[in-house]
Image (cartoon, rainbow, N blue to C red):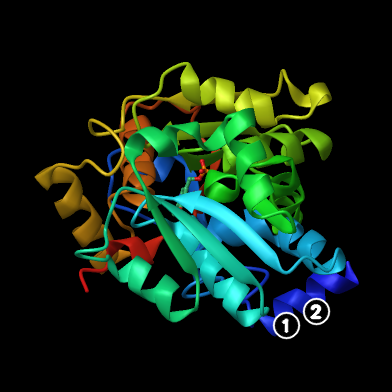
């Protein structure tokens, strides 16, 4: 698509992202072909899967001549960070509805948003819970009549085509593709795209928060009708207690993996790679499987200042 290429050039994105083999010293790793799709390298700010999920929506916004965007996220949100940067670059105005009051001590992410000219609105956790309610959204629409409202994480139907682009970039077929799961859009996009391309690939999600059943519902709701029975599964054993939670063991794992291979952080990619290591050591996959780990980016969330 021509307009998509124009946007990629304008934002200076490194696409297609690299697809690299890794050779970790995990038990049984030599029984598999392990690859990483380096979406963390797409851009330093427009974090991996957030570009994939926003690309089509941004095109729609630009083509429709929309100038205002409203979206949601937590104080460290990679989604708001990516969207805030895109809005600044594309001369769009962003209203960011943020869960909790950080006005006394803004996070590095929020400082960036403010610098890029976003209007930041802190809301209570109770109000934030209403972010997908029809009535709440109607009220927001009245307050911002000309705005495009983008759901949390950018996970919406228009996120699917961006993941299709990712699948089209791949140089080879995989038996498994693994990704982290939070709001489900990335996983739904991968299931939908591999299904559409008639690939014999199983998509495995690693849950990064507590949500057995809930996360499966989120993914299902985003899948097109004809992809509802796709070949996929979410693993819930590697969430380390919940969103943003970790242990000393996970932190050390991330640090060492970063030294030996590539940078990962404990909120998303750390849990993904940890989960992959456990599944490989348990010989969960048939011997000889080709496995792709999707590095979804998100390294900004790990900054201390
Ligand atoms: C947002 C995010 C995810 C979660 O993706 P969903 O589509 O919300 O499930 C994974 N990794 C990173 C780095 C993210 O920023």
| Residue drawn at (71%, 29%) of the image | 223
Report the front residue among 8 and 82: 82
Q: Residues within 10 Å of mark 1 (few under 14, many from 20)?
A: few
> Which quadrant is the C terminus positioned in?
bottom left
106 to the left or right of 118: left
Image position, residue 177 (x, y; %): 57, 40
Mark 2 surroundings: few (<14), some (14-19) or many (≥20) residues within 10 A: few
Q: Is residue 59 visible?
A: yes
Q: Is residue 14 above or below residue 105?
A: below
Give the numbered dot on residue 6: 2
In the picture as drawn, the residue positioned furthest to the right comes out as: 2
Q: Is residue 15 above or below residue 292?
A: below
Q: Splitting the image into 4 quarters, where does residue 5 fall?
A: bottom right
Q: Is residue 214 above or below residue 23?
A: above
Q: Which residue is mark 1?
A: 9
Question: Quick check: marks 1 and 2 in contact, CB under 8 Å?
Answer: yes
Quadrant occupied by the N terminus: bottom right
> In this view of the protein, can residue 20 be seen by the observer?
no
Instruction: Please name the residue shown 56% across and 53% down the image.
Output: 71
- What kind of element bears circle 1? helix
From the top left corner, tell me how far across and down residue 199 is, in percent.
76, 36
For residue 203, side relative to residue 10 (left or right): left
Where does residue 96 sit, x and y in percent of width and height?
49, 59
């Amino acid at each position: 698509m021509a307009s998509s290429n124009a946007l990629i050039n304008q934002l200076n994105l490194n696409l297609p992202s690299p697809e690299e083999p890794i050779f970790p010293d995990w038990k049984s790793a030599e029984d598999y072909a392990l690859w990483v799709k380096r979406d963390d390298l797409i851009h330093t700010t427009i974090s991996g899967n957030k570009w994939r999920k926003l690309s089509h929506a941004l095109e729609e916004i630009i083509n429709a001549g929309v100038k205002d965007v409203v979206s949601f996220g937590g104080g460290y949100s990679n989604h708001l960070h990516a969207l805030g940067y895109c809005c600044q670059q594309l001369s769009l105005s962003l209203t960011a509805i943020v869960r909790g009051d950080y006005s006394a001590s803004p996070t590095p992410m929020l400082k960036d948003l403010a610098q890029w000219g976003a209007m930041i609105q802190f809301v209570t956790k109770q109000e934030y819970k209403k972010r997908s309610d029809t009535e709440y959204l109607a009220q927001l629409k009245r307050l911002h009549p000309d705005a495009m409202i983008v759901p949390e994480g950018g996970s919406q139907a228009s996120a699917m085509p961006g993941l299709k682009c990712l699948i089209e970039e791949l140089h080879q077929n995989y038996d498994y593709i693994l990704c982290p799961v939070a709001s489900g859009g990335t996983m739904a996009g991968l299931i939908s795209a591999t299904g559409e391309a008639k690939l014999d690939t199983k998509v495995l999600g690693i849950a990064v928060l507590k949500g057995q059943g809930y996360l499966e519902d989120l993914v299902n709701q985003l899948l097109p009708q004809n992809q509802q029975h796709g070949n996929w599964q979410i693993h819930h054993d590697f969430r380390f207690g919940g969103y943003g939670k970790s242990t000393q063991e996970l932190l050390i794992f991330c640090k060492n993996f970063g030294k030996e291979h590539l940078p990962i952080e404990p909120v998303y990619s750390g849990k993904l790679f940890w989960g992959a290591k456990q599944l490989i050591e348990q010989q969960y996959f048939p011997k000889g499987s080709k496995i792709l780990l999707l590095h979804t980016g998100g390294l900004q969330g790990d900054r201390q200042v």
